[in-house]
Image (cartoon, grey):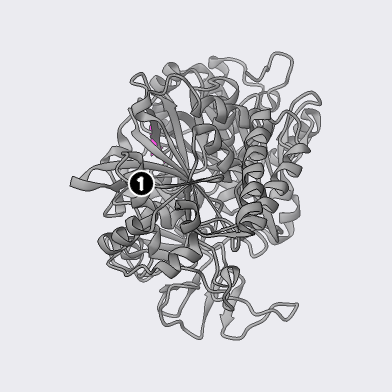
């Protein structure tokens, strides 16, 4: 557990509210009778002191205690519209929010963990010492909400009553942030005290956009205080930087799993979706994929759906792995979302009856949103993330400005989707049998392969590679993306990997519930398999087949080909599933291209991983042992069959 005995809690140092009595005095000074009545329903003294400290620091003109009622939600939305943080669109319930033009993703260069010299912090992250962070918060957040309304929300990151849910305060001056929180999280005002008392902790999030000016953006900061589970953000508007319930609190949840419940709990950057097997059997999947690597598409390919981004999981008393979604909504990238690949999501986005907050898309003169890759007719002009737009417009460097930003988003409640499962609100979680790991890999791995045991499955997750995406400002090129969670691992990568091995290898997991752990790759190209085109080998909808094959595999109903990297599907099984699941003919030639092992590429990838992890302190030896074993077997295969090995060779 992260110790706090000798450290200063920054918000308390600045607010100096040290008793429940003094907290109530602050409330009397700032709140009207209605909101005093509301805050009186919250009894937990530590929660009250945190809220009061934030009030003293930020000095708002008004306080709004959000109870989660329909009237409160509408009031917050009206404030967002009145303050121009959102604007109404043609479809009832739809609004548009624009972030600052230079803030279209996470400001990773201005995001810090507050850490002492002895604290282990991920090598992928920035750190700042506590005294410096204290002065930064003091100088930037003092009076930052002057003449503004502070909104205080009480949320659960997960179903009320679940052992791995996390209570969290969202304190903000942004009505857009508060509106988004109401779509994405469970307002638990009525249950907050009970949940904090039962679980023994809560997270605190304090944010203000300030004056929301472009010139202030270089001074924007996101701070995460792991020891006091408090986040601070200022002078920023993009939800990934401001809706601290999301990735800020996800980091605290990762810490909790790694350092307080080692081997029994995980907090992952994973979707949760259910695949139908024979006789309408539902098998639950969880899967990791970096942004832009098909994560939402995979989640929505399920017959029933729980979440597209985050998962809290634990080993239940019956020996099964259970998963819940901390969220109850979607903050999804819309680029390339279209009717062919995402029909259920498109129904929500293009048909009336649902609430949607759009961000950074193009809005035409009829107040209709448009985005890149929706396979629809586009207008020649409109208003988008950088202002007035017309076809052919270029930026200061002469580069074409796209119709919509690559990180354009839609925010909506998950129950708007037809395939959303009531199981999402079950505090006992979904019994999860299959875990998938996806990257953006043009030339190496097959579309699907299964680890031979849970330890090799952890290694698949550790070895994800991807292209940098628009979710991170300034990031470019190809990069490693361990578990698609590395940016959100606060501590040592070695500690996190050790937690993965201990969880999936835990003896508490019964044999009947043993996890199937698999790699997925949707991005293999024709060029990588002897062709000339950079087109993909396959289609977006093929994901349904790969998932269906894994569903049968989990129930021991289907065969496989054993290889050094794991188990591969047999052609006849896939041919049948392609016809049954998506009514598509699947040729032997395509199968051979997709599932042949290009050994030099795989061996080079293994070497890349070994060299990269050798630079990280504390990496478990198990990773290197498994990679060495795979590499040795691949080299032996190459000596006998050459650098390209087809499935037919392996099956004979």
Left or right of residue 108, residue 83 in this image: left
Secondary structure that dominates the magenta span = loop
**Quadrant position of residue 421:** top left
Q: Over which residues does the magenta segment extend?
A: 185-189
Is 507 rendered above or below residue 298? above
Asked if residue 190 shows in the view, the reply is: no
Residue 642 rendering spot, x and y as whole percentages: 63, 59
Q: Quadrant of the N terminus?
A: top right
Residue 567 rendering spot, x and y as whole percentages: 47, 46
Is 9 rendered above or below residue 67? above
At a point 41% along the width and 31% down the height, the residue shown is: 33
Is 501 rendered above or below residue 575? above
Q: Mark 1 sits on what residue?
A: 559
Disc 1 crowd rating (10 Å Cα; few below 14, some 14-19, many 20+) is: some
**In front here: 19 or 115?**
115
Left or right of residue 575, residue 79 in this image: right
Q: Secondary structure at mark 1?
A: loop
């Amino acid at each position: 557990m992260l110790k706090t005995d000798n450290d200063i809690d920054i918000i308390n140092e600045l607010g100096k509210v040290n008793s429940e009595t003094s907290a109530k005095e602050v409330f009397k000074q700032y709140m009207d009778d209605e909101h005093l009545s509301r805050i009186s329903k919250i009894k937990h003294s530590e929660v009250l002191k945190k809220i009061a400290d934030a009030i003293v620091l930020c000095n708002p003109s008004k306080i709004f205690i959000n109870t989660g009622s329909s009237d409160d939600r509408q009031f917050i939305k009206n404030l967002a519209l009145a303050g121009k943080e959102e604007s109404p669109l043609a479809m009832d319930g739809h609004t548009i929010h624009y972030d600052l033009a230079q803030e279209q993703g996470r400001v990773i260069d201005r995001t810090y963990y507050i850490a002492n010299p002895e604290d282990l912090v991920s090598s992928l992250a920035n750190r700042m010492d506590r005294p410096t962070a204290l002065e930064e918060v003091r100088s930037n957040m003092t009076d930052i909400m002057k003449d503004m309304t502070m909104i205080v929300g009480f949320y659960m990151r997960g179903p009320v009553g679940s052992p791995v849910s996390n209570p969290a305060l969202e304190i903000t001056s942004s009505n857009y942030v508060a509106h988004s929180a109401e779509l994405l999280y469970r307002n638990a005002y009525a249950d907050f005290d009970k949940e904090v008392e039962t679980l023994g902790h809560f997270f605190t999030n304090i944010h203000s956009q300030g004056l929301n000016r472009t010139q202030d953006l270089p001074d924007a900061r996101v701070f995460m205080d792991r020891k006091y589970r408090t986040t601070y953000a200022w002078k920023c508007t993009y939800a990934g930087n401001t809706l601290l319930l999301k990735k800020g609190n996800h980091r605290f949840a990762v810490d909790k799993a790694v350092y307080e419940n080692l081997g029994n709990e995980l907090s992952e950057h994973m979707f949760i979706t259910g695949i139908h097997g024979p006789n309408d059997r539902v098998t639950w999947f969880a899967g990791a994929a970096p942004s832009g690597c098909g994560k939402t598409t995979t989640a929505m390919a399920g017959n029933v759906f729980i979440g597209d981004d985050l998962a809290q999981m634990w080993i239940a008393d019956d020996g099964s792995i259970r998963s819940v979604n901390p969220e109850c909504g979607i903050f999804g990238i819309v680029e390339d979302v279209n009717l062919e690949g995402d029909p259920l999501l498109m129904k929500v986005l293009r048909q009336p009856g649902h609430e949607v907050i759009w961000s950074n898309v193009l809005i035409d003169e009829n107040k209709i949103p448009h985005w890149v890759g929706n396979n629809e007719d586009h207008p020649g002009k409109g208003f988008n993330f950088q202002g007035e737009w017309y076809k052919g417009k270029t930026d200061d460097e002469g580069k074409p400005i796209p119709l919509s930003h690559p990180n354009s988003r839609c925010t909506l409640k998950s129950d708007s989707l037809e395939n959303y499962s009531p199981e999402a609100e079950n505090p006992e979680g979904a019994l999860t049998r299959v875990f998938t790991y996806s990257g953006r890999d043009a030339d190496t791995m097959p579309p699907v392969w299964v680890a031979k045991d849970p330890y090799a499955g952890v290694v698949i997750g550790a070895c994800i590679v991807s292209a940098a995406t628009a979710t991170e400002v300034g990031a470019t090129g190809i990069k490693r993306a361990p578990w698609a969670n590395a940016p959100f691992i606060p501590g040592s990568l070695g500690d996190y990997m050790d937690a993965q091995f201990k969880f999936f290898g835990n003896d508490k997991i019964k044999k009947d519930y043993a996890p199937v752990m698999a790699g997925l790759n949707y991005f293999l190209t024709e060029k990588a398999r002897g062709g000339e085109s950079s087109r993909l080998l396959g289609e977006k909808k093929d994901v349904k087949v790969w998932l269906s094959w894994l569903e049968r595999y989990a129930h021991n109903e289907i065969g496989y080909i054993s290889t050094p990297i794991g188990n591969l599907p047999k052609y006849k099984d896939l041919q049948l599933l392609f016809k049954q699941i998506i009514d598509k003919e699947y040729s032997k030639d395509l199968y051979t291209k997709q599932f042949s092992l290009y050994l030099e590429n795989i061996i080079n990838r293994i070497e890349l991983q070994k060299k990269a992890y050798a630079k990280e302190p504390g990496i478990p030896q198990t990773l290197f042992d498994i990679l060495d074993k795979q590499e040795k077997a691949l080299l032996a295969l190459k000596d006998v069959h050459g650098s390209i090995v087809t499935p037919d060779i392996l099956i004979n």
